Amino acid sequence: MSTVAPEVPDNVAARVFAEPWQAEAFALAVALNQKNAFDWHEWVEVFSGQSGEPLVGNEKAIEAAYYQRWLAALEAIAVGHGLVSTPEVDHRVEEWRRAYLRTPHGQPIELARGLEADAEHEAHSHDHHDHDEDGHVHHHSVRAVPVSISPPAAGRSS
């Protein structure tokens, strides 16, 4: 297998990762390549398939979009090689979404908050329904809400 890494845009290669998840996605792709889960030729093909529109915008937006594509390629390869299933990926995405919703503004998002939501849901799953006099079960939906939100930026109309 090839050990030559895929090309990284100059503005990204010269910088430190902007977010921890970007470094983790990059490191995971390199580690999976080193474990012979895929070669870089396959990576380039899958990553190129994720590309679509050219990356435009300010440097931060371009970098974020680049690593979103990197993550999508990594997920596609992992699913394609049977390392993880699509439902497992979807479940983990949902756990991160719940973690985001349960994170106070300004705090780092930690997956544990999404897993706590799973545990709480399991523990209380029987608390969210009622039985009528005929024995029929009536379920009540529970909606996750953010712990806090940011006020709109000054001078911006909503």
Image (cartoon, helix red, strand yellow):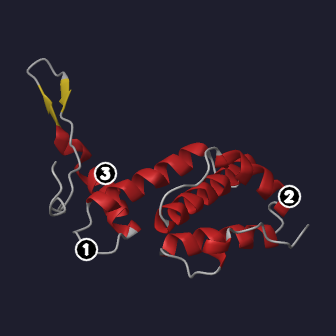
Front in this rendered view, residue 86 or 156: 156
Disc 2 secondary structure class: helix
Question: In the picture provided, is 59 more to the left or to the right than 54?
Answer: left
Q: Residue at x 66, y 76 (%)?
A: 13
Give the residue number, with chain letter if any, for mark 1: 106
User: Which residue is identified by label 3?
Assistant: 122
| Label 2 – label 3 distance at C-alpha | 43 Å
Query: Relative to 6, is 48 above or below?
Result: above
Give the class, few, some or many, for how many residues have Cα within 10 Å of label 2's Cα (few <14, many ≥20).
some
Please state the horizontal and vertical placement of residue 107, each as a whole percent of the image.
28, 75
The residue mark sitting in front, 1 or 3, is 1
What amino acid is labelled 2 in the image? Answer: His
Which residue is located at x 18 percent, y 40 percent?
128
Label for residue 41? 2
Of the numbered discs 1 and 3, the one sitting upstream in the chain is 1
Q: Which one is nearer the viewer's eye here, 156 or 46?
A: 156
